[in-house]
Amino acid sequence: MSIKQCEIERIRSVIPSVIRGLENPEKKTRSLLIEKWPAIAGGKLTPHTRPQLTQKGILYVYVSEATIAYEISQKYRHSLLKRTQAVLGEDAVKELKVLVGK
């Protein structure tokens, strides 16, 4: 094997660990949240909601109307929080807040 081939093989062996190092666990968590949101929120709430998770573990649920925000706050806040924690982990999601707009 030539020196050039040895260098190429060494680079190939290092690439997977470099890629793993570049992966962002927060980005993975947010992507999983978006992917699983229809199952978490259910068919009634999904079309009217958009989740956003902060680095501090606050799940903001943006809704299209104040009446939906009120309904979520009164009826579904706790169950949405628990279902999201079941998917992402209790450490990832500590609190849920409902906001109108955005």
Image: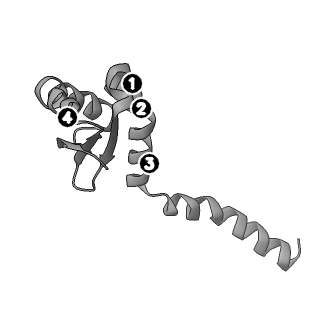
Marks 4/1: CA distance?
19 Å
Please report the residue visible at 34 percent of the width from the left and 32 percent of the height from the top.
48
In the depicted view, which residue is nearer to us: 1 or 24?
24
Amino acid under disc 3: Lys
Q: Which mark is residue 28?
A: 3
* Image location (x, y in percent) of residue 44: 33, 20
- Mark 2 touching mark 1, by CB under 8 A? yes
Task: Residue at the far right: name it.
Answer: 2
Marks 3/4: CA distance?
27 Å
Please report the residue visible at 53 percent of the width from the left and 58 percent of the height from the top.
20
Amino acid under disc 4: Ala
* Image location (x, y in percent) of residue 35: 46, 36
Label 1 sits on residue: 39
Q: Residues within 10 Å of mark 4 (few under 14, many from 20)?
A: many
What is the quadrant of residue 37 in the picture? top left
* Image location (x, y in percent) of residue 22: 51, 63
SS assignment at label 4: helix
Q: Residues within 10 Å of mark 1 (few under 14, many from 20)?
A: few
Amino acid under disc 2: Lys
Q: Nearer the viewer, mark 2 or mark 4?
A: 4
What is the quadrant of residue 49 in the picture? top left
Label 2 sits on residue: 36
Q: Residues within 10 Å of mark 2 (few under 14, many from 20)?
A: some
Please report the residue visible at 32 percent of the width from the left and 26 percent of the height from the top.
45
SS assignment at label 1: helix
Label 4 sits on residue: 69
Q: Earlier in the sequence, mark 3 or mark 2?
A: 3
